[in-house]
């Protein structure tokens, strides 16, 4: 324990190590947060969900914070409805079961770039006679634009941009810009707009609810992708996936490599020969190509890929490096002494040989984490990512297949790339510092 | 079985040959000797005469290139040579006999606390819990004169003498009836050597342990020895009681070996034996010492048998 504390004290003398530790802890915290707030099944449901889950979001929207860095203000997205009270709703009962619904929503529009679309989702309950609504938009300059009158079924969707009649009425090329600017001007008119919906139902039990959605140009913390999915989800969930893959793969690989090298070195003879021949064969096999084959023909499940990664990474050059040191350590007097007092072979391997290698193991273990994180991401980029899990690599793959960089959706690629880079750097910083802490000690002993 | 039950250790025709690219090295070539309990035997000889190989043969710590390993080693009446490796490991090592290896200072695991290391044989062989094993460790540390608080230390925090004592404590912890000490005091200063010898004497007195002390330090070993065995070229050439041997060695090699011990404050130069021990790869026929022996005569070209002389044994035609 003292040893551990003194190592830690030496470690925190390196600023890079402190930064690395901080980032690694932050990542672990985010991973825990992601898994607690969005349980696995929920994450998978959202990630695989289509229009019915994500209808409130715009497509290809950049994150909202780009407005702070941009001279042009991009319109933000919002979604309000009468059920949660963000839209006012007053019901006035009349004669013969007829009720009048007055619904309104006032919003501030102070953007330079028009929203992608405005949509009304109307839900009603009725038996025979369909309710009726009329929609108006009140502009800051006191104009009232009549959007239209509709007879609504149980579920009725109205997209402002798709309405040809409205387009004709506005005498413009596009609906949305025409709504948010003065007639004849191409400059947006900033100020308070008010959407007024007046509904009439003809049956006593009828109800009428409206959800008003604005698909802006920017959305949330991370923006959205081609399927309107909020990128916060895969970015958050990518953390536990990346950490789990990186840590399990590097720990599994390092520890198994060490144990197998120790067993080979200790028993020598045919055991050692076998391990060495397997290693030599494995060294000439193309690792990445094998993984691609497994992903293409067998399974793209992250656990299968993880298992294959570990198995293929055990028998590599490091088994030879470890073996070389073990063979040297094996001849030490204290090993012979242990043998003399009757220690069994497993006891010597695990209590005498392997502990000698721990100072070497820890830095290399930490340093190899980013390699495995990148491996998982690169497999996802070429389309061999886990089919159900949201990961960083999957974001980049989606971005790539939707031509994100060509179309200028830089956020889509940069966000996961930044996280990958930060993760890699944090583990690398920590690994280098650990190396410096542990290796002089190795020389001392 | 023709075991001698009253003997603690009875070695008969023990052979250990190593294979090399140039041929077979006959490091231990037909060694016989007996040892009673609570006795200490010193095995003396020059470097390369097979002393350490003998200790390895006794504890079956064999290197990979063993060519021939045979003979009988009766420990308390059982021929341990007939046991398989696993039985040998469980029943002989540290239970029947333990070893303080050559350069015992380096025989401690640098990454384990010495307390843990001393406790380990007790836990492995006696099946003790860690707490009970540590009680034993404290007792052993007291026997060998290591302060009790040293259990927490790592080997590199101890001096050479202390490490030697820890190695000794480790050999003692399972209370074996026989301890093989392979040059326990070489590389230590004179005071520490004397100290360790006193510790060994006390242990022998208090615990009734037998020792096989392998050394070329004749002066120090004479402190402890009850019996002496002289080894030359893989064979034991003389055995006898220490109090008979030291004043009057019988074998010419023993005499010359004793004469080569430097004496304090005398004018005479210490003697040395001209020539070198024969190559064990291809030892000469007949007496192996003949080539360097000043008393050589024609009989020496035949292998001398072991002659009993009073209670001493000597392998030399001079004593026929």
Image (cartoon, grey):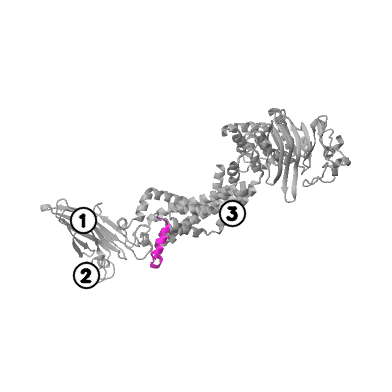
- Can you identify the residue that label 2 sits on? A168
Outermost residue toward the left in this view: A96
Q: Is residue B268 above or below residue A130?
A: above
Secondary structure of residue under mark 2: helix
**Is B291 on the left or on the right of A209, as rendered?**
right
**Dot 2 or dot 3, earlier in sequence:** 2
- Count of numbered circles in the view: 3
Which part of the image, by quadrant, shows the N terminus of chain B? top right
Residue B287 or B149: which is nearer the viewer?
A: B287
**Is B282 on the left or on the right of A207, as rendered?**
right
Residues rendered magenta in the picture = A390-410
- Can you identify the residue that label 3 sits on? A277
**Is B235 on the left or on the right of A287, as rendered?**
right
Q: Chain of mark 1?
A: A
User: x and y percent of residue A443 in the render?
Assistant: 63, 50
User: x and y percent of residue B35 in the render?
Assistant: 74, 32
> Is residue A442 something that shows in the picture?
no
Occupied quadrant, residue A155: bottom left
**Dot 1 or dot 2, earlier in sequence:** 1
- Can you identify the residue that label 1 sits on? A154
Secondary structure of residue under mark 1: loop
Q: Chain of mark 3?
A: A
Secondary structure of residue under mark 3: helix
């Amino acid at each position: 324990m003292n040893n551990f504390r003194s190592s830690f004290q030496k470690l925190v003398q390196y600023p890079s190590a402190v930064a690395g530790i901080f980032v690694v802890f932050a990542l672990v915290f985010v991973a825990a947060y992601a898994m607690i707030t969005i349980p696995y099944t929920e994450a998978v449901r959202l990630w695989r969900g289509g229009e019915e889950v994500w209808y409130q979001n715009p497509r290809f929207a950049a994150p909202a914070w780009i407005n702070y860095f941009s001279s042009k203000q991009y319109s933000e997205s919002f979604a309000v409805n009468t059920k949660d009270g963000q839209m006012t709703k007053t019901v006035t009962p009349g004669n013969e079961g007829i009720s009048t619904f007055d619904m309104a929503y006032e919003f501030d529009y102070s953007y330079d770039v028009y929203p992608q679309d405005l949509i009304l989702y109307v839900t009603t309950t009725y038996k025979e006679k369909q309710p009726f609504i009329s929609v108006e938009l009140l502009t800051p300059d006191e104009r009232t634009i009549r959007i239209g009158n509709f007879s609504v079924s149980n579920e009725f969707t109205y997209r402002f941009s798709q309405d040809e009649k409205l387009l004709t009425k506005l005498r413009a090329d596009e609906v949305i810009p025409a709504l948010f600017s003065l007639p004849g001007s191409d400059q947006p008119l900033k100020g308070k707009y008010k959407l007024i919906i007046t509904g009439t139902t003809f049956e006593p039990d009828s109800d009428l609810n409206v959800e008003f959605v604005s698909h802006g140009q920017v959305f949330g913390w991370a923006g959205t992708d081609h399927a309107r999915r909020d990128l916060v989800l895969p970015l958050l969930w990518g953390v536990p996936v990346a950490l789990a893959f990186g840590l399990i793969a590097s720990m599994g690989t390092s520890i198994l490599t060490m144990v197998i090298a120790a067993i080979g070195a200790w028993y020598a003879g045919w055991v050692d020969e076998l391990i060495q021949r397997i290693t030599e064969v494995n060294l000439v096999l193309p690792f990445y190509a094998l993984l691609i084959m497994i992903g293409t023909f067998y399974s793209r499940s992250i656990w299968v890929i993880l298992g294959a990664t570990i198995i293929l990474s055990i028998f590599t050059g490091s088994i030879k490096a470890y073996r070389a040191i073990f063979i040297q350590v094996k001849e030490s007097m204290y090993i012979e002494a242990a043998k003399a007092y009757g220690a069994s072979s497993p006891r010597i391997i695990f209590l005498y040989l392997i502990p000698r290698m721990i100072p070497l193991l820890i830095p290399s273990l930490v340093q190899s984490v980013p390699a495995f994180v990148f491996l998982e991401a690169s497999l996802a980029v070429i389309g061999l990512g886990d089919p159900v899990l949201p990961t960083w690599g999957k974001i980049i793959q989606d971005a790539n297949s939707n031509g994100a960089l060509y179309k200028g959706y830089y956020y889509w690629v940069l966000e996961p790339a930044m996280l990958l880079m930060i993760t890699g750097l944090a583990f690398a910083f920590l690994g280098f510092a650990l190396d410096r802490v542990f290796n002089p000690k190795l020389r001392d002993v | 079985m023709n075991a001698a039950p009253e003997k603690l250790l009875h070695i008969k025709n023990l052979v250990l040959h190593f294979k090399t690219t140039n041929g077979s090295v006959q490091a231990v070539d037909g060694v016989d000797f007996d040892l009673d309990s609570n006795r200490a035997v010193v095995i003396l000889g020059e470097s390369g005469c097979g002393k350490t190989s003998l200790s390895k043969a006794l504890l079956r710590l064999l290197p990979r290139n063993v060519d021939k390993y045979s003979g009988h080693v009766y420990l308390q009446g059982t021929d341990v040579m007939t046991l398989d490796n696993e039985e040998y490991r469980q029943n002989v090592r540290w239970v029947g006999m333990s070893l303080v290896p050559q350069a015992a200072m380096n025989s401690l695991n640098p990454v384990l606390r010495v307390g843990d290391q001393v406790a380990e044989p007790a836990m492995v062989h006696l099946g003790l819990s860690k707490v009970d094993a540590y009680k034993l460790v404290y007792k052993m540390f007291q026997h060998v004169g290591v302060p009790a608080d040293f259990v927490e230390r790592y080997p590199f925090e101890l001096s050479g003498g202390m490490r030697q004592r820890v190695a000794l404590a480790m050999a003692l912890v399972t209370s074996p009836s026989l301890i093989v000490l392979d040059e326990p005091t070489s590389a230590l200063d004179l005071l520490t050597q004397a100290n360790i010898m006193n510790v060994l004497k006390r242990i022998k007195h208090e615990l009734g342990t037998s020792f096989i002390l392998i050394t070329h330090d004749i002066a120090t070993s004479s402190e402890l020895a009850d019996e002496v065995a002289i080894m030359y070229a893989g064979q034991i050439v003389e055995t006898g009681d220490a109090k008979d041997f030291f004043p009057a060695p019988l074998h010419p090699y023993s005499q010359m070996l004793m004469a080569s011990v430097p004496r304090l404050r005398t004018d005479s130069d210490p003697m040395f034996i001209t020539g070198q021990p024969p190559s064990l790869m291809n030892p000469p026929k007949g007496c192996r010492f003949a080539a360097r022996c000043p008393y050589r005569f024609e009989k020496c070209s035949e292998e001398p048998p072991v002659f009993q002389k009073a209670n001493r044994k000597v392998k030399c035609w001079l004593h026929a």
